């Protein structure tokens, strides 16, 4: 069955839901962009003060916090943790790059 074979009412509802999903995806991308702007500033601050790019204690508390938020939002906490771990890895990579650039200027 293709979308052409679907009742017009069902197709309209499907399109409405997909538009909402598209809007949510756009919001997620914009929120991630804002998050990375903040973490870039953190990276520069860490580099200026010769702090390590990673902060395992902070990362662990953030993972636990996000898992609890996921549970209260009825989202799989393991999925939320995987997502945050992916984001954290990217942030650390950025911080390492910033630290390397900062070290090259001194």
Image: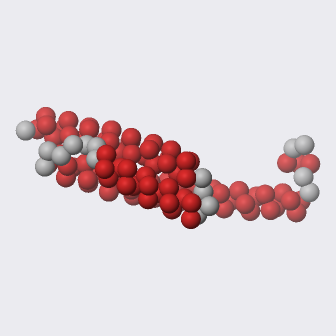
Q: How was this image coloured?
A: secondary structure
Instruction: Judge from the rendering whether residue 16 lies leftward or rightward of residue 78; answer left or right.
Output: right
User: Which quadrant: the C terminus?
Assistant: top left
In x, y percent, where is residue 48?
14, 48
Q: Nearer the viewer, residue 66 or 102?
A: 66
In x, y percent, where is residue 90?
38, 41
Q: Is residue 1 above or below residue 20?
A: above
Instruction: Judge from the rendering whether residue 47 lies leftward or rightward of residue 40; answer left or right.
Output: left
Q: Nearer the viewer, residue 85 or 32?
A: 85
Residue plotted at (39% across, 45% down)? 88
Q: Nearer the viewer, residue 58 or 34?
A: 58
User: Which quadrant: the N terminus?
Assistant: top right
Residue plotted at (16% across, 40% down)? 102
Residue plotted at (65% across, 57% down)? 21
In x, y percent, where is residue 60?
37, 50
Q: Is residue 90 above or below residue 16?
A: above
Q: In this view of the protein, can residue 26 be seen by the observer? A: no
Residue plotted at (39% across, 55% down)? 62
Q: Is residue 99 above or below residue 45?
A: above
């Amino acid at each position: 069955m293709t979308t052409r074979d679907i009742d017009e009412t069902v197709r309209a509802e499907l399109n409405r839901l997909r538009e909402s999903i598209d809007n949510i995806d756009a919001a997620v991308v914009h929120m991630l962009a804002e998050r990375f702007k903040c973490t870039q500033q953190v990276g520069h601050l860490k580099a200026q003060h010769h702090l390590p790019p990673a902060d395992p204690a902070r990362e662990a508390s953030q993972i636990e916090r996000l898992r609890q938020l996921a549970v209260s939002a009825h989202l799989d906490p393991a999925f939320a943790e995987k997502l945050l771990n992916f984001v954290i890895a990217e942030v650390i990579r950025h911080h390492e790059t910033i630290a390397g650039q900062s070290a090259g200027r001194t």
